[in-house]
């Protein structure tokens, strides 16, 4: 039933009926499996991949990658302080990394000032945050496995043997 | 200007007109395409781009780059346990299509009889005739799932038959054979001393059991011309790289023709093919999984909307029966195109035995398959009482 996840990860609109056909399973079994995955938190939610760069008149938001060095706390390690940080809605993603810094955040704001003030006023002032380095994203080419440029796909002839 | 009698006699593709119709129409969902809808995996493209940048734009040896022949030899050894010597037993061709032509020309004398299953891929018959052969069609039937069986073959074989063309998994039916089924066929081949041209281009797209390469079976290596290529498994149709493996004398005969006609397969395709074999097989496995899901989906949907469709063992084709519509294949395909803008290939394009069937290629995105099966369902409701 894990294949259900593969199918939904590719296209969350695929209906249980369609999945049942693709996997030769009963519709009920597929529905139950999906429910179970949802309940267990394996399926977190269903979202749409949007490329706002194409919407010319849209208010462009600004994203930055932020490297954060933190001092781990006794008894909590990094988790406690990470939670303090990732609970801010400005933080889209938060990863604990090996290497020269500890957390990598993806932060979104209205504009550069918005992100800057988040970093200077909220993030950097948290106890145990030792330093931050902010990299503003200039252009997104590919995100989570999806190439954002429209690739013209159908070069095939209309019919062939 | 007078053209040659052989070409004049060659049957014009009976559905040329239908094809032109499809090409002339807009917004058609085409399930008539005989190639993958995936783009060639990026590691392969990238490697070819790099080789162009380095200036690899020359001829190669007639037989093809040694490095590619070596890679193929190792690949076959790993996959099937069969050994072909890269120096002598392997020829790189411009797609399997060329390999079919070379093999037939290398073995057929004027008037030699050759067995070709009906229905089968469109080129076998005309190319055999161009090589001077006399084609005997082995009429397989939808009632038996379009399978060749020893009993059926025995009706056709005799001392006068020189060779047979085998293609499995098969275009257009998707039929393939288990090892056990093949053993039965092989006995007939050996007993009647047939040369077997085995076109196994769809071998990686076998879903329900492992594919058995013909030359791995007893008595077959010395009589099989094994054909394969990169088009289907690696989504490399446009690169035109295939290969033939077989007994040394056959391969050198084929190389003789190849050196005067094609000279060599394009070097960029050959270099790309090396990367295809050397790189990760992840994309092949992923494509296969995706095709399998589409197969289950389309077979189930077609049966649901009222077209009887057997589950094909391989390829990306299904070959459903349209007999309950009362229409012939050509009429069905034409009407479906006009009324619902869905293109499929009439079964008769692949031989008379294809009458009453259509070929649907599911090498198309799930969205297309969903929409197309909706439309076919609508079409059936409107046209079948």
Image: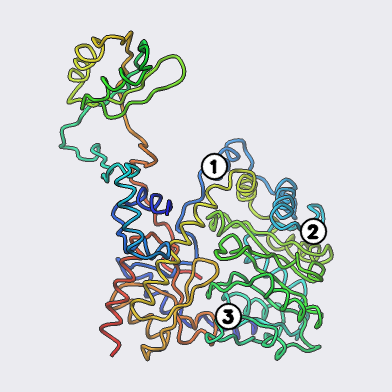
Q: Which of B364 and B10 is in front in this view?
A: B364
Same chain under badges 3 and 1? The reply is: yes
Against B131, residue A85 (above or below) is above
Judged from the image, the secondary structure of the residue bearing numbered disc 3 is loop
Disc 3 crowd rating (10 Å Cα; few below 14, some 14-19, many 20+) is few
Residue A134, image quadrant: top left
Q: Is residue A47 left or right of residue B195?
A: left
Nearest to N terminus: mark 1 or mark 2: 1
Find residue A1 and report its horizontal and vertical position in percent.
Answer: 42, 54
Q: Mark 1 points at which residue?
A: B43
Say if mark 1 contacts mark 2, CB within 8 Å: no
Q: Chain for mark 1?
A: B
Find residue B220 and report its horizontal and vertical position in percent.
Answer: 78, 70
Q: Mark 3 points at which residue?
A: B1
Find residue B373 and report its horizontal and vertical position in percent.
Answer: 33, 71
Disc on res. B89: 2
Find residue A59 and report its horizontal and vertical position in percent.
Answer: 15, 32
Same chain under badges 1 and 2? The reply is: yes
Q: Which is more foreground, mark 3 or mark 1?
A: 1
Q: Hey, which residue is sitting farthest right in the picture?
A: B249
Nearest to N terminus: mark 3 or mark 2: 3
Q: Chain for mark 3?
A: B
- Residue drawn 55% across the image and 67% down it: B314
């Amino acid at each position: 039933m894990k294949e259900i996840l593969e199918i939904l990860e590719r296209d969350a609109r695929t209906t249980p009926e369609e999945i049942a056909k693709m996997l030769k399973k009963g519709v009920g079994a597929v529905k139950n499996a999906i429910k179970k995955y949802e309940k267990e938190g394996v399926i977190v939610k269903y979202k749409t991949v949007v490329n706002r760069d194409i919407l010319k008149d849209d208010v462009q938001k600004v994203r930055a990658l932020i490297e954060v060095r933190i001092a781990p706390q006794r008894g909590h390690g990094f988790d406690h302080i990470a939670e303090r940080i990732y609970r801010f809605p400005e933080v889209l993603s938060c990863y604990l990394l090996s290497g020269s810094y500890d957390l990598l955040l993806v932060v979104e704001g209205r504009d550069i000032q918005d992100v800057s003030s988040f970093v200077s006023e909220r993030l950097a002032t948290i106890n145990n945050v030792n330093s931050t380095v902010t990299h503003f994203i200039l252009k997104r080419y590919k995100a989570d496995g999806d190439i954002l440029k429209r690739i013209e796909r159908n070069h095939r002839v209309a019919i062939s043997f | 200007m007078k053209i040659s009698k052989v070409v004049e006699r060659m049957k014009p593709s009976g559905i040329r007109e239908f094809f032109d119709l499809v090409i002339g129409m807009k917004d058609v969902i085409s399930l008539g395409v005989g190639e993958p809808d995936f783009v060639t995996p990026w590691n392969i493209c990238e490697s070819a781009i790099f080789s162009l940048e380095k200036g690899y734009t020359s001829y190669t040896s007639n037989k093809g780059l040694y490095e590619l022949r070596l890679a193929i030899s190792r690949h076959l050894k790993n996959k099937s346990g069969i050994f072909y010597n890269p120096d002598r037993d392997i020829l790189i061709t411009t797609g399997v299509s060329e390999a079919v032509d070379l093999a037939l020309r290398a073995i057929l004398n004027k008037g030699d009889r050759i067995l070709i299953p009906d229905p089968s891929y469109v080129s076998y018959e005309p190319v055999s005739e161009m090589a001077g052969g006399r084609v005997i069609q082995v009429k397989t039937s939808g009632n038996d799932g379009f399978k060749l069986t020893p009993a059926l073959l025995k009706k056709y074989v005799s001392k006068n038959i020189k060779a047979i063309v085998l293609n499995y998994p098969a275009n257009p039916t998707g039929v393939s054979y288990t090892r056990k089924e093949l053993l039965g066929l092989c006995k007939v081949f050996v007993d009647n001393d047939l040369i077997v041209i085995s076109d196994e281009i769809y071998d990686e797209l076998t879903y329900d059991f492992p594919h058995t390469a013909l030359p791995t079976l007893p008595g077959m290596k010395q009589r099989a011309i094994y054909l394969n290529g990169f088009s289907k498994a690696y989504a490399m149709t446009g690169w035109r790289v295939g290969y033939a493996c077989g007994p040394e004398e056959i391969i050198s005969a084929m190389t003789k023709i190849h050196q005067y006609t094609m000279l060599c397969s394009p070097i960029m395709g050959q270099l790309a093919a090396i990367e295809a074999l050397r790189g990760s097989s992840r994309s092949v496995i992923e494509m296969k999984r995706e095709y399998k899901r589409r197969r289950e989906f389309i077979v189930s949907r077609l049966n649901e909307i009222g077209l009887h469709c057997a589950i094909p063992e391989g390829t990306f084709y299904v070959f459903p029966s349209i007999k309950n519509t009362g229409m012939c294949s050509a009429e069905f395909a034409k009407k479906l195109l006009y009324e619902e803008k869905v293109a499929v290939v009439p079964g008769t394009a692949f031989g008379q035995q294809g009458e009453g069937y259509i070929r649907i290629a599911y090498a198309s995105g799930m969205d297309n398959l969903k929409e197309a099966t909706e439309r076919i369902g609508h079409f059936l409701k409107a046209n079948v009482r």
